[in-house]
Structures are given as structure tokens and as C-alpha cells.
Image (spheres, rainbow, N blue to C red):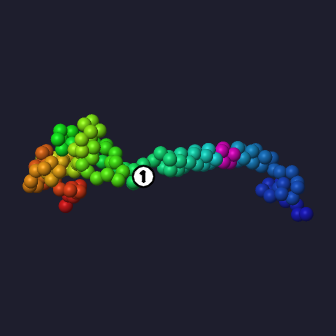
Amino acid sequence: MASHGKGSLLKGIDGSQPAAGAAKSAGAKGSSAERKNKIVAIVCVVLLLALSVFIVTSFLGGETAASTSEVRAVIDSESGELIEKFRLPEGKSFPYVNPKTGRNTLYLAEPCFWAKDGTIKVHPTWVLLNEFAGKSGPTICPDCGKPVKSHNPYPVIR
């Protein structure tokens, strides 16, 4: 076997004694590497747990496109009462039954996002279309004065 000099970094590879400083540096590097490995393992476990929670809630308790489309804002055509989160009855068409009165007086509400000053609002004014209220002519938003139509679009700034 080849003999290595006293200051050789390869000392100990061929079975001979390692250099004096090599044991200390290997121990220090080993503990640092162990800490890094533990941190990486903890981060991986946390990410896997978060992903698992996301997957479970999306399949079991999360909202789907179908479930959110079943809940709409409706207005009572007689009282003007707004119900912002009304679950549409499956297989039924409007007018829907108002759970408070038992009468078929609920119609889909249309949102108007315009403010009186011409700016856009985050929370809309809900409007009952004239055709559902038994009135003729275009429906005008009571807040901003703009016309409101079925499937009223969100304002676009150009």
C-alpha cells in the first residue's frame, strides 16, 4: 500500500490512523448535516400533512362549482326582502317558495356593482328585474341609476 505523508488529507482511507484534526471536523460536519437532515424531514412532514388536509377537505368538505351554483341571491317580489344565500331547490324553476311565507315569490336577484359616483363597488346592490316584479320597461338600479339586465355583467374599465 502506498504511504501517505503526515499532512495528507487521504490519511485513514487505506486503514491507517486519520489525521488529528480530521476526527474533530468530521464530528462537527456530521452534527451539522444531521441537523439539516432533521430540518428537511420536519419540513417534508409538515408539507405532507398540509397537502393531506387540503386533499381531504377538497373531496369531503370543500365547495365545488356545482354546490356554489346552487346557492344564489334571491329577492321576494312582494316584500322586496333579499336572501343573499338561498339554496335553489333541485329540479324547480322560479318563482321559488319563500320559506317565511310559503308563497312562490322568490326570484333570482341581479347584482349591480356601480356606485352613485360612477366607481365600482365590491359588494353589489341586488336588484329584482322588472319582468319578475310585473312591471314594464327596463330595470334601473335604485343605487346608481344604470340599467340592469339578466346576467348583469361585472363592470369593465377601459
Query: How many marks on residues?
Result: 1
Camera-side residue: 112 or 136?
136
The C terminus sits in image quarter: bottom left
Residue at the image position 23 percent from the left and 57 percent from the top: 151
Q: Main secondary structure of the magenta part?
A: helix
Q: Quadrant of residue 35?
A: top right
Q: Residue furthest right?
A: 1
Q: Residue furthest bottom?
A: 2
Q: Position of residue 132 (x, y in %)?
A: 17, 51
Q: Position of residue 43 (x, y in %)?
A: 59, 46
Q: Residues within 10 Å of mark 1 (few under 14, many from 20)?
A: few
Residue 114 magenta-drawn? no
Residue at the image position 91 percent from the left and 63 percent from the top: 1
Decide if residue 103 is on the left or right side of residue 31: left
Q: Residue furthest top?
A: 100
Residue at the image position 47 percent from the left and 45 percent from the top: 61
Q: Position of residue 57 (x, y in %)?
A: 50, 46
* Kind of residue at disc 1: Thr
Camera-side residue: 88 or 148?
88
Q: Residue furthest left?
A: 137
- Which span of residues is magenta-colored? 33-39
Residue 37 magenta-drawn? yes
Secondary structure of residue under mark 1: loop
For label 1, the residue is 64
Q: Is residue 96 visible?
A: yes
